[in-house]
Amino acid sequence: MSKIIWISSYPKSGNTWMRYFIANYFFNNIRINDPNIIKKIKAFPNTEILKKISSKDEIIDNPYDISKYWIKSQELIKIANGNICFLKNHNALVNIKNHPFTNEIHSLSCIYIIRDPRDVVVSYAKYKNMSYDRAIKDVCCKELLYVLNKKNIFPKVDILGSWKYHFLSWKNGMKKMPKVFVKYEDLIEDSYNNFYNIIDFLSKLLGFKINIEQIEFSIECSSFKNLKKHENKIGFFENESKSDFFRSGKVGNWKKELNISQIKHIEKEFKSEMKLLGYL
C-alpha cells in the first residue's frame, strides 16, 4: 500500500516554496537549477485519476461530491520507485458525509505550513484579484468553504473552510499520524534551521542519513528570488491567475495594506489561534 506524506497548507501560505525545497532535496540528485523539479510532487486530488472514476458534470454540480473519491483516488496512486510519495494539498482534514479526506492506511505523515492570516488575506486577495473585504470574508468564513476551478480539463476542487478551521483540522485530526508544523515567517527568518528540522523529521520517519550539502543546495535553488526569476522568465505552470504567483514573499505586508477595521476583524476571529502561534 502506498503511503502519502502530505505537504499541506491554507492557500498562499508557502506550500509551493516547501514543495520546491522537498523536491530539490529528494529528486535533484545531479544538482542543477531546474524550475520543473517541483513537478516531481503532484497536487491532490489528481485530475487524471478523477477523470477515470468520476464525471466532470458531477463535480461541477456539487463540488462537495469530490469527497466520495478522495480515498479511491489515494488507492489508485502509482509510485515509480518505492511506496512513499509526497503530495501537495490545500484541503482541510475534513470528513464529508462519512467520506474522510484521508486515513492512516494511506497517510504516513504531514508537513503543515502556516502563515499569519493577515498576510494570507493580502496574498490571497492579490492572487485572486479580489478586494481585501472579500478575501477576509473567505478566510474568516463560518461555513465549509470550497474553491472550484473549472478552467482545467477536469474541475479542481479544494475544500478549505476558514483559516482557523483548516489549521485546527490538521492540528487535531488523525492523532496517530506524525506531523510537523512550520511557520512561513520562521522559514523566512531562518531558512536553514527550519528546513533542516523538516529533513530531520523525515529522516527519522523514513530512515535515511541527512545530507547537509543537499540541504544547502535545495535552499539556494528554492529561494524566493530564484523562483521569482524563473516565473518572470518562463512563467509558472500552476499559476491560475493573471497576477504573479511569486509576488512578494515578505512578512508583514498586512501592516500597510489592511485598514484598522480589517485587521481587528481578523484578529478577533482568530484570537486564540494567533496567540497560540505567536502572531498576537
Image: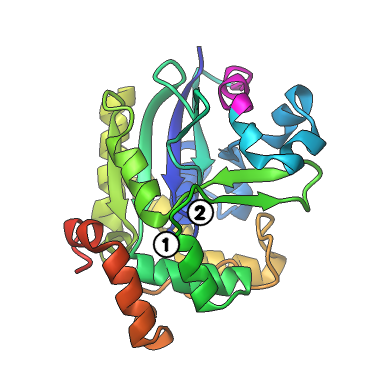
Q: Decide if residue 201 is in sight here.
A: yes
Q: Quadrant of residue 219?
A: bottom left
**Which residues lie in the magenta part?**
68-80
Of the image marks 1 and 2, the number of the one nearer the N terminus:
2
- Amino acid carrying mark 2 in the image: Thr
- 25 lies left or right of 201: right
Answer left or right for 53 relative to 184. right
The residue at the point 31 percent across, 26 percent down is: 177
Q: Secondary structure at mark 2?
A: helix
**Residue 73 in magenta stretch:** yes
Q: Residue at x 66, y 55 (%)?
A: 238
The amino acid sitting under disc 1 is Cys
Q: Main secondary structure of the magenta part?
A: helix
Which numbered tag is attached to residue 16? 2
Look at the image and tell me whether residue 225 can be seen.
no
Closer-to-camera residue (95/223): 95
Residue 266: percent from left, percent from top: 34, 70
Q: Is residue 173 left or right of residue 278?
A: right
- In which quarter of the view is residue 247 placed? bottom right
| Percent x, y of residue 271 | 23, 63
Q: Among all residues in the image, which is located at the extreme top?
A: 1
Residue 100 lies, in percent from the top left, at 48, 26
Residue visible at 46% across and 56% down in the picture: 17
Snapshot colouring: rainbow
- Tell me if mark 2 has few (under 14), some (14-19) or many (20+) residues whose alpha carbon lies within 10 angstroms of its own: many
Label drawn at residue 140: 1
Q: Which mark is residue 24?
A: none
Q: Residue at x 71, y 27 (%)?
A: 49
